[in-house]
Image (spheres, helix red, strand yellow):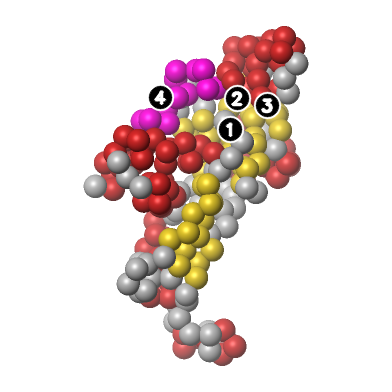
Amino acid sequence: MVTRGLFACRIDPAGVKPKQTWVLDVTQYAEAEQMTRSYGLSLDEASARVFSRTLSPELQAKLEEKNLGLDYGKLDRAIAKGGDIKYIDFRKDWSPHFKRLCIMPDGRLVETGGIAEFATLHKITLAQAKTLLDRGGTLEVEGEVLACQIVNGQASVARFNRQHYAKAKDLAQAKGLHIMDALSEVGLSDPALMRALRRVEQTGVRGKA
């Protein structure tokens, strides 16, 4: 967990597809950076590959259709008169249309597609999930802890086990760190968590080949 994400903008040189902009959270940004180093991709191409994996199959299919497959004959005239769609600004929310990754203590990256699915995964209430994802911070769950940072308006989540949490609390006390900074240090020094990012990045590239 670091303190920045990535804003990306893609423009079709042929002018056929609409301009697209999106934001990667910190986990996805790390995946994109690893792609650039491992496969020689540009950061633009790597970020597009990482982002596309978060979209539902339904939305991916619509993006390949002209004007997202909308029937302009059925649209309100005030909307239709604007002509073809020229710009798509992806705002990643916690709806089923966007899949988000949560780093688990054993190094797995688990996808969730909405607040309800996220709450079910971690066995917390909807209210707890919404507060965590809206405000960031930490939430103790069965002796473990969920840590959420809000970066560029987007939530990035990792779950730490009892050992991780205990080590982070010791670090926080010994060094006078905020618990989020201490958890970041613990996460960045854990080989299993770092290997998880590399596995996802490698799988993603092969899946796109």
Placement of 177 over or under 147, stated as above or below = above
Taken as a whole, is the magenta stretch helix, strand or loop? helix
In this rendered view, identify the residue nearer to me: 163 or 50: 50
Residue type indicated by callout 4: Arg
Q: Which residue is mark 4?
A: 195
Q: Which residue is mark 2?
A: 184
Earlier-in-chain disc, 3 versus 1: 1
Q: Which residue is mark 3?
A: 180
**Residue 198 location (% of width, % of height):** 38, 30
Say which element carries label 3.
helix
User: In percent of the image, x 44 and y 20: which residue is there?
Assistant: 192
Residue type indicated by callout 3: Met
The residues colored magenta run 187-199
Say which element carries label 1.
loop
Q: Depth-wise, is mark 3 or mark 1 nearer the camera? A: 1
**Residue 27 location (% of width, % of height):** 51, 37
Discs 2, 1 touching: Cβ within 8 Å: yes
**C-alpha gap between disc 2 and disc 4:** 16 Å
Give neighbour class at mark 2: few <14, some 14-19, many 20+ (Cα, 10 Å): some
**C-alpha gap between disc 3 and disc 1:** 10 Å
Give neighbour class at mark 4: few <14, some 14-19, many 20+ (Cα, 10 Å): few
- Dot label at residue 2: 1
Earlier-in-chain disc, 4 versus 1: 1
**Residue 200 location (% of width, % of height):** 38, 35
